[in-house]
Amino acid sequence: MSTTTQATRPDLDAYYGPFTSEKEKEVLGVPLRLVGAWSRNDAAGVADTFTDDGILILPGDVFKKGRDEIFSFMAAAYAGPFKGTGVTGNPVDVRFVNDDVALLRTHGGILAPGETEIAPELAVRSTWVCVRRDGEWKLAGYQNSPRGAGATLRW
């Protein structure tokens, strides 16, 4: 999906919120790609969102490095406790370290099968380290932690 097409969709206008520059929208495409892959429970699609040496850190002492480890972890999650789940979130902060590195912060969480709202225990605060390589934004590092008094998410 092109940035121009994304910018004209009302649902994406709400997603982008105050982050309206083309550069911000480009890097915010990374979470959108991950959300799309997750909605299909597509472990390969989630892994492809990352750089070859990308890092995934989650509550419960989860540390995965590289697309192969991330793929294996997500495939097992989709076959087990996260089968049929989705994720959602909204950007809270976008910071460019330089032209090819951005730090994103989002608030969101996991959607249980059939749900459209995040249960309090599944709410997370996430940090995304995005890098542009060969003209494409990828995820170099992702980490989340439970958010809010009721959050208890563990992998």
Image (cartoon, rainbow, N blue to C red):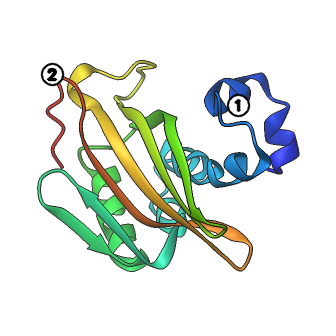
In the rendered image, which residue does mark 2 sit on? 149
Element type at mark 2: loop
Local packing at callout 2 (Cα closer than 10 Å; few below 14, some 14-19, many 20+) is: few
Q: Amino acid at mark 1?
A: Leu
Please tell me in which quadrant of the rendered image residue 114 appears.
top left
Nearer to me, 63 or 128? 128
Element type at mark 1: helix
Q: Is 60 situated above or below 10?
A: below
Q: CA distance from mark 2 to mark 1?
A: 29 Å
Q: Is 98 situated above or below 87?
A: below
Tell me where residue 74 appears, x and y as whole percent. Answer: 35, 60
Nearer to me, 150 or 92? 92
Q: Count all numbered tags in the image, as a single digit.
A: 2
Tell me where residue 70 appears, x and y as whole percent. Answer: 36, 69
Tell me where residue 155 appears, x and y as whole percent. Answer: 18, 49
Q: Amino acid at mark 2?
A: Ala
Nearer to me, 143 or 83? 143
In the rendered image, which residue does mark 1 sit on? 12
